[in-house]
Amino acid sequence: MKQSNSNQEKLYLTLVRVVNNQNAIDESIYKKTTPLIHTVLKSEIEIDYPAIFSMVIKNNLKSEEIEGILQILMTAANSIESGQEEIAEKIQKIARHFKLSFNQKEYFESLKVDYEKDLESKVGFYIGEVVNEMNKSKIKMIDDINESKKEVSKLYPQFITILGIFTAVVLSVFGGMTLLSESFSKINQVPIWKVVIISSIVALATLSMLFLLTRWVNVVISKSFNYDTEKDLMKVLSNNGAFTIGFVTFVYLIIAAVVFSSESNKQKLKSLTEVWDSWPIIIVLCIPLIIMVAMFLKILDDRVSK
């Protein structure tokens, strides 16, 4: 890089100091600066353009200061004697380059301002986006908390229901056992079909309440771990094979007890057994067995398919 000429640099620094220290340029300033300009430029071959640009940038010259320097230079150029036109040309080049350097400084500063505004706008936009996302996350978190509170509040009555069902199971079991004990203590006085009906009803009630109890527990657990419970009736029955088979069995026993509670039906059964025509009896007895086997196979098929 070309080194700045020290004489020209001193000249430019003197001009800058003059315009900085004077509110207005008068004749006395011209008398001091014009001889100095002529003396320095008389011995110079090239104009030190980097020194001019550096002087404008470092001192952050304003428009009025540039105008003062230009007035001094033009005054010096106009006072050139005949035969020294080369010095006047150098002064004009210096003046043009001062003006050019000032315009470059203004352009760079405008670029800097535009860049800072653009950067500030982008930073503000991204900060706004981050704030919006944080607000959305905050709202979602609040909604999730409120939803969890609602779910928890819904669980309380379900727990109470479960406790109620459990209490009903205990009471029905003890009550049923008491009723059955009294029935069996009077086995000779109470007809068999009544004992079967009472036993089956107690068993059905116990099974149903146990089924409801386990069903409610399953619902509570499902909501706690946020997965759906099965709502299709056939799938519910297939997933609870013991209850389904027990329910069908006890219902069949109740129906059979009601059918054979009639004396005429008993006589028909007795006549059938006396003549060893037992096919109708076998068929009747096999109906629940066939139903239970079919249901058991359906349950196995559903579990294997899963």
Image (cartoon, rainbow, N blue to C red):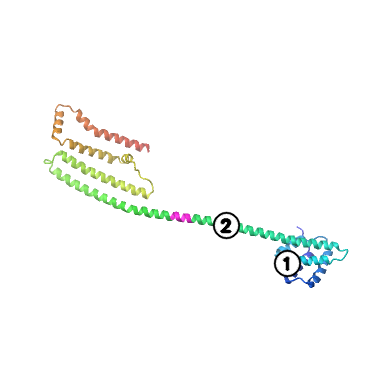
Q: Position of residue 152 (x, y in %)?
A: 36, 54
* Secondary structure beneath label 2: helix
Q: Which stretch did the figure color magenta?
A: 135-141
Instruction: Verify whether residue 221 appears in magenta.
Output: no
Q: Position of residue 266 (x, y in %)?
A: 14, 33
Instruction: Tell me which amino acid carries mark 1.
Output: Glu
Q: Position of residue 74 (x, y in %)?
A: 80, 65
Q: Is residue 278 above or below residue 246?
A: above
User: Looking at the magenta stretch, what is its main secondary structure?
Assistant: helix
For mark 2, what is the residue? 123
Q: Is residue 299 above or below residue 14?
A: above
Q: Position of residue 45 (x, y in %)?
A: 83, 61
- Residue placed most toward the observer, 189 or 257: 257
Side of 303 relative to 201 (left or right): right
Q: Is residue 175 visible?
A: yes
Side of 86 relative to 107 (left or right): right
Give whichever of discs 1 and 2 has the lower sequence position.
1
- Distance, label 1 to label 2, CA atoms, is 36 Å
Rendered residue at 29%/51% (across/down): 161
Q: Quadrant of the N terminus?
A: bottom right
For mark 1, what is the residue? 65
Instruction: Tell me which amino acid carries mark 2.
Output: Val
